[in-house]
Image (cartoon, rainbow, N blue to C red):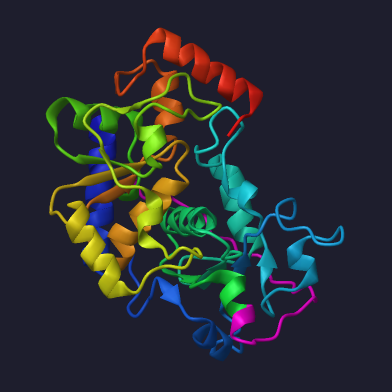
Amino acid sequence: MGVFRSVIRFLFSLFASLGFLTAAGAQPLVAPAELAARLGDSKLRIVDIREGQENEIGGKPAFDLGHVAGAQHAPYSKWRGPAESPGRLPALDSLTALIQRLGIDRTTPVVVVYEGKSSTDFGSAARVYWTLKTAGVATLSVLNGGMTAWRAAGLPVSTETSARAPSSFQITLDPRLIATRDEVAQAVGNRSARLLDARPAAYFAGEERHVAARAPGTIVGAKNVSHDVWFTKDGQLLPGDDIKRIAKQAGVVTDRPTISFCNTGHWAATNWFVLSELLGQDNVTLYPESVVDWSNAGLAMDNVPNRLQQFWLQLKVASGAP
């Protein structure tokens, strides 16, 4: 299996070097005014990933109450795995059907829209962006600041549903962007890649645990850089110069391969996005299943509390206490 993945990675790298898998001029972040100026582009696809359950006002989902004109609704949960492993990519046929329904193919320009309410909220946009890029979509952007920034700019919203002709795009996942459990284990064993834990410090220290994870703690040898360091207090991405400064201070500017992980590949998608798309670092991958998968496989972890501490943590998780 390792040899097969190596061959696939080589082929993707070859095609990329020949210009088949990249798009000149693609920008990872697009400002509200820039998106507004592009609304007349019939090729553009705007994917609104806001979840109705999280954003209901007066009994209606936020998308129904107002969205960017021409946007299509594809809630974040559609891009995620099952409850026992939320970070897992959807089955290939399900992901293909979703992307086809949105009328997206390899060359379609896509803008991902989220609510823009917090740094954690941004993780949903980063994860969908990563998923689309992994599926082979070449021209991608995130609406910087989401719908919060769109409204703040005084731009109009629509309540009309826009139908798009489905595509026939047959996706192939790009292994250069995905870290498997075996590859993470290899990195643990030979230090061939930096392991970057995007979770808040309490999770890294083993003081908190995701409900689906078998054990608290972090992957052996990991460095902790919380996903929220790249944001202002109101949940907006910092300016580029500040992001570069923080990255340098955190020691994440490196030519070593980097594997980003968290609990379920949500917060980790933000660190992947910042390093790969904003800072332009090569060889940054995402471990989508992250600590939930790693811990449930019974693999070695750092910062695991003793049995008594784990007992109290288990009670805390079971009670739903913050």
The answer to whether residue 64 is above or below residue 229 is below
Tell whether position 160 is magenta.
yes
Residue 279 visible in the snapshot: no
The answer to whether residue 224 is above or below residue 37 is above
The answer to whether residue 312 is above or below residue 194 is above
Q: Which x, y percent locates residue 12?
A: 28, 54
Q: Is residue 261 left or right of residue 283?
A: right
Name the residue at 61% across, 52% down. 76
Q: Nearer the viewer, residue 130 or 321?
A: 321
Q: Which x, y percent locates residue 172?
A: 43, 50
Q: Which residues are magenta?
A: 151-175
Name the residue at 56% across, 76% down. 149
Q: Main secondary structure of the magenta part?
A: loop
Q: Which x, y percent locates residue 233?
A: 46, 63
Q: Nearer the viewer, residue 120 or 256?
A: 120
Q: In the rendered image, which quarter is residue 121 located in?
A: bottom right
Of all residues shown, which one is farthest toward the right? Answer: 59
